[in-house]
Amino acid sequence: MKKIVFLLLVSLFFPLTANAKDFLGAPVIPQGKAIQKTDSRLELKTLLSHDEVVSFYREALKGFENIKFREWKDATYIEDDGKMPWHSITISKGGKESTDVVIVKDNWTWIIWTLVLRYIGVFIVLMILFIGMSVSGKIISRSVQRMGAKKAANESS
Amino acid sequence: MTANEILDMLYGTLHTTGVFNFQWNVIIMWGVGCLFIYLAIAKKYEPLLLLPIGFGIFIVNFPLVPLMGDSHGHPQLLQVFYHYGLQWEVIPCVIFLGLGAMTDFGPLIANPKTLLVGAGAQLGVFITFTGTVLVGFTLKEAASVSIIGGADGPTTIYLTQHLAPQLLGANALAAYSYMAMVPLIQPPIMRLMTSVKERKIRMRQLRPVSRQEKLLFPLVTSAIIALLVPSVIPLMGMFMLGNLMKESGVVARLTDSAQGSLMNIVTIFLGISVGATMQADKFLSWKPLFIFSLGLLDFGVCTIGGIVTVKIMNLFLKEKINPLIGSAGVSAVPMAARVSQVEGLKYDKTNHLLMHAMGPNLAGVIGSAAAAGMFIAMFD
């Protein structure tokens, strides 16, 4: 109860408190105080704990398709793989008195970079396989040669 | 019994037939089904798959047929095949087992640098992804469509079932159709991307590969794929198991089953199940048209990617690689390798590229599986 009263007071006294229901279609936590807002990014601070913010988003995004919650070490990362105008919501972990929430607009930079990285990733996988095959091939070729030489020596003796 | 009662009875009986439940859009699907049956029989384009797929499309698009729904709470015949075979992702993996049991990795082991060509040829997969998103597909759908260029049927089906099952029919059909058309699609691109001098490059005969190396290959590959791209290990693990069975030489009966009867059985179930997913009300939209157009672009860019990779490698290699084998970096085993051979022979009647092209061709299978794994990891 105390917490609710406190949050109500905070929302009354902080003029910067975000009262928009959503940012680019992404739900905005009602008690959040906007720290930075541009066309493509909204950063909020809230006195709610990380778990409370996550539960808010789990409830708010219930029924949305293509939404994925990822648990990172420092944050919970919510990603939209569908057609929403926003791309991600990052909820920080470990804040002592507040939790940071960052909502980022869907953008081509992310898509292009993730594709470039994954294409490079395919090269890396096959490069490692190439190295593994080359090394194991050399070792085996040598041991086969040695065994052949031994066999030949035994036969000649 | 009055005349009205008799008419009612007749009316009721007629309503249990397909004729009274007819919708115009199924005619288009009959046409699509018959087209693929025609391509399989008359043109011999991937007949093992296009024939059952075509028939699946044809038969499932008759009104009231109890094939893809539920009857009294029990799934109907093709629904059972689809559910256990494709939704459970069993069939693509079993097909990979059979393919592994058929495959000789000797050319790839003898010339492992061709693995990089298999990676380079995945360029189209990543470029088409962008194009697919631009035309309005979701990211998951885009990933499943873009893998078509990898020219690997089971991988396409596996990834599509995983990320965008609603596109399964169109994606599988596009993948197998374009794989069948590799001899038509690739040669003009190969000629465009290479000079006559490059096409005449002779490559040194491949070294003989010992049995030990062939035995170690599936283990090393499985370990590396399992560590780096674990999401595709159901596919690659089965592929490598099939190959280990073949190379070990001690389980001839299992190898025969895997590459023979088992493969044939699952191919029937795969074809008919894929065809059965293409019901008129789900299939007739703008998306399949885009999938077919983007798939063609994808194949083209993948072919270019393989050739350009060889050209880049040639800048650093003392012994040059014939860039015609770069096009084989798309999977389509062994069709793409045969295309390299045929194109090479046109410019030098004694320059046999088939075995050299098998290296990138097999690398393409691993490369497309790796690309699929990257996409699964991206969305899971």
Image: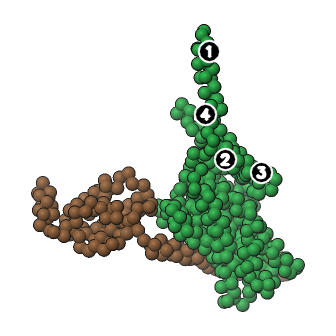
Q: Residues within 10 Å of mark 3 (few under 14, many from 20)?
A: some
Closer mark to the observer between disc 1 and disc 3: 1
Can residue A48 be seen here? The reply is: no
Q: CA distance from mark 1 to mark 4?
A: 21 Å
Residues at marks 1 and 4 touching, judged by CB atoms closer than 8 Å: no
Q: Quadrant of residue B11?
A: top right
Q: Residues within 10 Å of mark 1 (few under 14, many from 20)?
A: few
**A107 left or right of B4?**
left
Percent coordinates x, y for residue A115 in the rendering: 51, 72
The residue tagged 2 is B28
Badge 2 or badge 3: first in the primary sequence: 2
Badge 1 or badge 3: first in the primary sequence: 1
Amino acid on which disc 4 is placed: Asn
Q: Colour of chain B?
A: green
| Image disc number at residue B21 | 4
**A54 left or right of B172?**
left
Both labels 2 and 4 in a single chain: yes
Task: Label 4: state its secondary structure.
Answer: helix
Badge 4 or badge 3: first in the primary sequence: 4
Q: Residue at x 61, y 27 (%)?
A: B16
Both labels 2 and 3 in a single chain: yes
Task: Label 1: state its secondary structure.
Answer: helix
Q: CA distance from mark 2 to mark 3?
A: 15 Å
In front of the other: B66 or B290: B290
Q: Residue at x 58, y 65 (%)?
A: B146
Can residue A102 be seen here? The reply is: yes
Both labels 1 and 3 in a single chain: yes
Q: CA distance from mark 1 to mark 2?
A: 36 Å
**B104 left or right of B134?**
right
Closer mark to the observer between disc 4 and disc 3: 4
